[in-house]
C-alpha cells in the first residue's frame, strides 16, 4: 500500500504531540488528529518532568522554547503529616547527591503550546484539529482513517494517544483493568511570601498526599489528593476559606500564601490496558495507562512510550521493514511490563500512606527515617524519580 503517511496519531494531548514530534524526529511522516482544538485547552496542572523526559524535550528543541518557565527541582522532602502537625521523621532527597535536578516543574499551559508550536513548524507533521473521525479501518495491508467530511488518510501505523477513555482502544476490543480510588485531586497554583528554593514537598495526610511543587516566580502548584467527599467540600469553599485551609495544612514555612489560578478537581483511578498493540495499532500515554498522581509519573510514562515508539519506528524505517508489522511487538514488550510495575508501585504507595492503621503509620514513619539515613537507598529512589533506571530509549538519554 502506498500510504499518505507512515503514522497517524489520534490525540494531540501532551503525549500525542510528543509522540508525533519524536517519530518525526526519527524520519517518519506523521498525521496528527484531535477532536478538540489544542489552543483552547484549560489545564491548570503543572507536570514534574523527570530528568530523562526533560532530556527528550532538549533533543526535540522544546526545552529551549520554555525559557523562563522551567523550575528545576533541587530537593524533595517527604513527610508523614497530620493537619497542624508534620512528622519530624522526614525523607529528604538532595539532588546534589546525584549530580543534578531529578526533574523540572513546567506548567501544562506552557508546555502544550510549546509542543504545539514545534509540531506546527515540523515539515514531517500535518496537524488537523478540531476534526471528527468517522471511522478507522485497520487491515493487514494498512490503516485508513476517514473524517466526517469524508476525507481519507492512509498510513502504515495508527497510534492511539486519545486519553484514558480511548475510543481506539475500545474499538480494538482491548480490555482494561480499572480501579477507581475513592479520591479526587485538587490542582491550583499559589504565590507565597518566602522562597521555596526549588524544593518539592509531599506531605501525607490520612485522606491522601498534598504535593507542593515549586514553580518559577515564587509560586507553587499543588496536587491535593483527598477523599472524594472532602475534595467536593473544599472545592465548594470560597477562595478565602480554601486558602486558610490550605495554609493550615502547609504550615507556615512559605509565609503568606495567595491563590493565583482557578481550582480544578480530577477524579483519580488506576487503569491499565491489558495489551498495548493490535493489528497496526499501538496505545501510548493515558490511552494505555492512567495512574495515581502521587509520584508525578503519569506523563513521564507516556513520554517514555513516545520515545520507545520512536526507536522502534527508526529501526523499521532504517531496515525497510513494515512499520505496522512485527516491530510493534518490540514496543509492547518494552513498555507494557515497565508501566504495569510503576502503576502497581504508585498504587501501593497511595495505600501505604493513606492507611490510618496505627502500626502501619508507625512503620512508615520509621521507614522514611531509615531510608533517609541510608545513602544507597536514597540514590536508588532518586534514580527512579529521575526516570534514569531500566532500558532507556535513545531520546531519553543524555
Ligand atoms: C491531578 C494530576 C496531576 C498530575 N501530575 C503529573 C505530574 O506531575 N507528572 C506527570 O508525569 N504526570 C502527571 N499527571 C498525569 C498526566 O497529566 C497525564 O498522564 C497526561 O496528561 C496524559 O496525557 P495524554 O496525552 O496521554 O492524554 P490526554 O491529556 O487525555 O489527551 C488526549 C487527547 O486526545 C484527544 N481525543 C480524545 N478522544 C479523541 C477522539 N475520539 N478523536 C480525536 N482526538 C481525541 C483529546 O482531545 C486530547 O487532546 C497528573 C495527572 C493528574 C490527574
Image (spheres, rainbow, N blue to C red):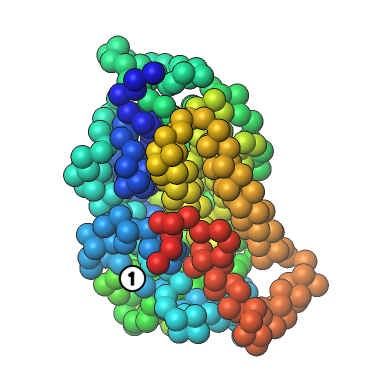
Q: Is residue 4 left or right of residue 88?
A: left
Residue occupied by mark 1:
71
Residue 228: x and y in percent read: 58, 49
- Residue drawn at x 53%, y 80% is 93
Please name whichever residue, 1 or 191, is drawn nearer the observer in this view of the structure: 1
Residue 72: x and y in percent read: 36, 73
- Residue drawn at x 25%, y 43% is 119
Please name whichever residue, 358 or 131, is drawn nearer the observer in this view of the structure: 131
How crowded is the residue under tag 1: few (<14 C-alpha within 10 Å), some, or many (20+)?
A: many
Please name whichever residue, 300 or 353, is drawn nearer the observer in this view of the structure: 300
- Residue drawn at x 69%, y 58% is 348
Q: Quadrant of the C terminus?
A: bottom left
Q: Quadrant of the N terminus?
A: top left
Q: Is residue 377 left or right of residue 389?
A: right
> What secondary structure is found at the residue carrying circle 1?
strand
Residue 40: x and y in percent read: 26, 40
Q: Residue furthest bottom?
A: 373
Q: Is residue 92 visible?
A: yes
Instruction: Decide: is 4 above or below 394.
Output: above
Q: Is residue 115 left or right of residue 85?
A: left
Q: Residue furthest top?
A: 150
Identify the image quadrant of residue 238: bottom left
Identify the image quadrant of residue 173: top right
Amino acid at each position: 500500500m502506498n500510504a499518505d503517511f507512515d503514522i497517524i496519531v489520534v490525540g494531540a494531548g501532551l503525549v500525542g504531540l510528543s509522540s508525533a514530534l519524536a517519530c518525526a524526529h526519527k524520519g517518519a511522516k506523521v498525521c496528527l488528529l484531535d477532536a478538540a482544538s489544542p489552543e483552547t485547552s484549560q489545564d491548570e496542572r503543572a507536570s514534574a518532568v523527570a530528568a530523562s523526559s526533560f532530556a527528550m524535550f532538549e533533543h526535540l528543541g522544546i526545552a529551549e522554547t520554555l525559557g523562563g518557565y522551567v523550575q528545576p527541582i533541587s530537593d524533595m522532602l517527604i513527610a508523614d503529616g497530620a493537619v497542624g502537625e508534620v512528622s519530624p521523621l522526614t525523607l529528604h532527597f538532595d539532588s546534589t547527591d546525584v549530580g543534578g535536578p531529578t526533574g523540572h516543574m513546567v506548567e501544562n499551559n506552557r508546555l502544550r503550546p510549546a509542543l504545539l508550536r514545534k509540531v506546527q513548524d515540523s515539515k514531517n507533521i500535518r496537524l488537523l484539529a478540531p476534526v471528527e473521525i468517522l471511522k478507522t479501518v485497520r487491515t493487514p495491508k494498512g490503516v485508513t482513517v476517514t473524517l466526517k467530511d469524508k476525507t481519507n488518510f492512509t498510513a502504515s501505523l495508527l497510534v492511539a494517544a486519545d486519553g484514558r477513555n480511548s475510543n481506539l482502544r475500545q474499538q480494538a476490543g482491548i480490555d482494561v483493568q480499572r480501579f477507581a480510588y475513592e479520591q479526587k485531586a485538587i490542582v491550583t497554583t499559589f504565590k507565597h511570601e518566602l522562597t521555596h528554593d526549588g524544593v518539592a514537598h509531599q506531605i501525607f495526610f490520612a485522606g491522601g498526599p498534598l504535593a507542593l511543587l515549586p514553580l518559577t516566580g515564587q509560586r507553587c502548584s499543588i496536587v491535593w489528593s483527598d477523599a472524594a467527599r472532602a475534595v467536593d467540600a473544599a472545592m465548594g469553599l470560597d477562595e478565602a476559606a480554601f486558602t486558610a485551609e490550605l495554609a493550615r495544612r502547609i504550615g507556615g514555612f512559605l509565609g503568606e500564601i495567595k491563590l493565583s489560578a482557578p481550582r480544578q478537581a480530577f477524579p483519580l483511578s488506576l487503569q491499565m490496558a491489558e495489551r498495548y498493540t493490535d493489528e497496526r495499532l499501538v496505545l501510548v500515554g493515558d490511552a494505555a495507562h492512567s495512574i495515581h498522581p502521587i509520584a508525578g509519573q503519569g506523563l513521564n510514562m507516556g513520554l517514555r512510550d513516545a520515545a520507545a515508539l520512536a526507536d522502534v519506528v527508526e529501526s523499521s524505517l532504517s531496515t525497510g521493514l513494515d512499520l505496522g508489522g512485527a516491530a510493534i511487538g518490540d514496543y509492547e514488550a518494552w513498555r507494557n511490563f515497565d508501566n504495569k510495575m510503576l502503576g502497581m508501585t504508585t498504587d501501593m504507595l497511595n495505600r501505604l500512606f493513606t492507611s490510618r492503621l496505627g502500626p502501619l503509620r508507625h512503620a512508615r514513619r520509621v521507614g522514611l527515617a531509615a531510608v533517609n539515613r541510608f545513602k544507597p537507598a536514597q540514590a536508588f529512589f532518586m534514580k527512579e524519580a529521575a526516570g534514569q533506571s531500566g532500558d532507556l530509549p535513545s531520546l531519553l538519554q543524555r
